[in-house]
Amino acid sequence: MEDTFARLESALAGRYRIEREIGRGGMATVYLADDVKHHRHVAVKVLHSELASTIGPDRFLREVDVVASLNHPRILPLYDSGDASGFLFYVMPYIKGESLRVRMDREKQLSIDESLTIARQVASALGYAHTHDVIHRDVKPENIMLHEGEAMVADFGIALVLGEADDRITERGYVVGTPAYMSPEQSLSESDVDARSDIYSLACVLYEMLAGEPPYTARNAQALLAKRLVDPVPSVRRVRGTVPTNVDQALVQALAKAPADRFASVAAFAEALSAPARPQPAAIAVLPFVNLSTDPENEYFADGITEDVIAHLSKMRALRVISRTSVMPFKKSLESLKQIGGKLGATTILEGSVRRSGDRVRIVAQIIDAESDRYLWSDTYDRQLTDIFEIQTDVALQIAAALKAELTVDEHARLRKEPTSNVEAYKLYLQGRHWYVTYTTHGMEQAIAYFERAIAIDPSYALAYANMAIAYTEIAEIGAVPPAAAIARARAAAATALELDANLAESHSTVAYLDMCDFQWERAEQGFKRALELNPSSADTYDLYGRLCSAQERFDEAIALLRRAQEMDPLAHRLDVATTLLRAGRYVEAAVGAEGALAFEPDLDRAHATLGWALIKKGNTDAGIASLERAVSISPGTTQWVAQLGLAYGLTGHADKARGILRQLEEKASHSYISPYQMVFVYTGLGEHERALDLLERSV
């Protein structure tokens, strides 16, 4: 180190007198120096030697010239730059104040007014640079200097210089930018990073000034990126409830995962920090109702009440309702309501209990503000079981009133419509739903049996028909039975449901999905749109609609719809975005998304399969095959993963292993149903395309 200091002193002699080192980062070391010619203190930043050799002096000096042309009162100017005996350096004023990082380390949270003032001042500097086609790419507290109450941006454009160098920077372990503040697209090393990436980084800085911590934290950079791609955008008001709603809304938009969903300019972001708050649908999570009945068999009844209340609330466009699959993991959770609300992106929580005895039911329900833990409403219903639908409607209306959600006339009518007048049919329906959510072949078969029994008691039970249709489509998709028979039954059940009740969102969505399977694209799209009109909070409909767009290679639309599904059901649809990114050829993002899903559910077979293909497509064949093998070991009975492993073996030169899998599938097909489509994977991998085409025709 002393040798480096001495060589630097010698290289800059006559121009700068180096006094001491004052800072060191991942890309450069900073020295306090005396400008010999102008008699002033300056900060000399010297790139680390390996990085300097990777970039080369010509490119460095050419790009630094662009940065030197910036002239703005909130941009720390670039005095000088050069190549001195192999040292690539640039010179800026030495500011006697302190960096925003030092200030935040000392105070943790800044006042709201000061935070907004600093953010607007930085936005002014960024906006000027963006109009000159310069992107900072490393906006962080360390690069914001505070001098006499004013914020100034340092290191402007240097990260851009590095980012435009070449892939060798990444190969040698350098990361352009700082993980806690990098936009998703910059983290993924995408080539088309633009001004919206700086907007994201500035939003991270503002969030930290207000909350005392960045919006996402994790044990390492990879886990941080996974959370950024998978988790809902956090609300700063969960940490600091005094932050104005309009500021929270502006931060949520600026932190959007997709650049297209952010502000078009940093000036628009700054303006939004002062604009009135926009009306936003209240986000509510209905936690699983606690079963207080003496008979544990009544657990299905409590879960069913939870589902039905969610279904009632989902009919209200003025509310955003978290789906069942995301709330159920919090059954009997010891986490605080604030923690649960944060994980689900919900501002309001409904919790309750159910006690059933004979033909009577006692339901206790209460609405709590997740941010303040304040009770907004509570009530106890001690009624006959025949009043169950009236209770559910009343709870839904009380929630709407507490959250000031206005209902349309149609929404009122749909809320008050009882699905069945027969309590026994309703109990059978709830048992069917209990089996359905196991998402297994046996569970689907049991669910269908219960739905059929409910329909036998009440042939006008449209919701039972609708759910039976959904169960049949699941069985067809799993491949447990020949699809033709299951799809025919699904169509018949869905058609009957719509004849009985034309306003059932579930049936419209199911029919649309079946139309999609028959390649009736336009009809399917209209069906999904109608389903979302009737149930604006249906994560499953957004998910299926996203699949339709993906099938048509409308990938941007598909990803937007699937992210919307993830917003409604954050714990259930975290992988669907990754699989669509894989189909879109965005392999790096797909791999990160799959790893993010595995961080929450390590034995998720589909996540291992998705990760496997992303790795193979990136050229990491051995790791990709290992991940596919892991998917098979988790679910050896799922022929889809077995077949895909056969495809991977064939494509990577392991023909013997591929043929072994083919024999395995053919043997299984001799005594149970295996879709010909599974064989197509393996024959394609083996290069036997004529045979693969024959089987594709059979599959259709």
Image (cartoon, rainbow, N blue to C red):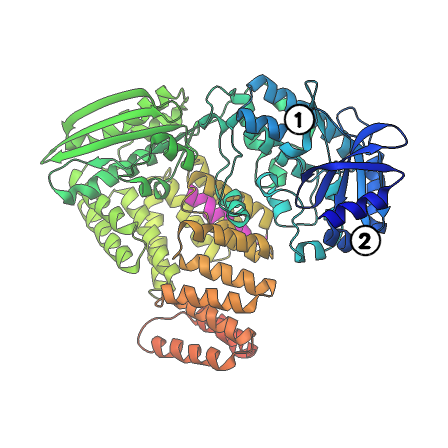
Residue 236: x, y in percent?
A: 50, 28
Of 3 and 262, nearer the camera is 3
Residue at the (60%, 54%) spot, across then down: 586
Say if the magenta span includes residue 480.
Answer: no
Residue 533: x, y in percent?
A: 45, 35
Q: Within the image, what quadrant is residue 489 found in? A: bottom left
Is 672 left, or right, of 183 in this rendering? left
Q: Residues within 10 Å of mark 1 (few under 14, many from 20)?
A: some
Q: Total label count?
A: 2
Residue 618 at least partly seen: yes
Of 25 and 533, nearer the camera is 25
Q: What stretch is highlighted in magenta?
A: 539-553
Q: Within the image, what quadrant is residue 40 found in? A: top right
Badge 1 marks a residue whose secondary structure is strand
Q: What residue type is labelled 2?
A: Gly
List the residue tagged with mark 2.
56
Q: Which amino acid does label 1 sit on?
A: Glu
Is 258 left, or right, of 594 in this rendering? right
Magenta span dominant secondary structure: helix
Badge 2 marks a residue whose secondary structure is loop
Return the disc, 2 or 1, that comes first in the chain's sequence.
Answer: 2
Q: How crowded is mark 2: few (under 14 residues within 10 Å), some or many (20 or more)?
A: some
Q: Which residue occupies the extreme bottom position in the image? A: 656
Of 449 and 519, nearer the camera is 449
List the residue tagged with mark 1.
98
The numbered dot on residue 554 is: none
Say if the magenta span includes residue 548.
Answer: yes
Rendered view: 579 above or below 21:
below
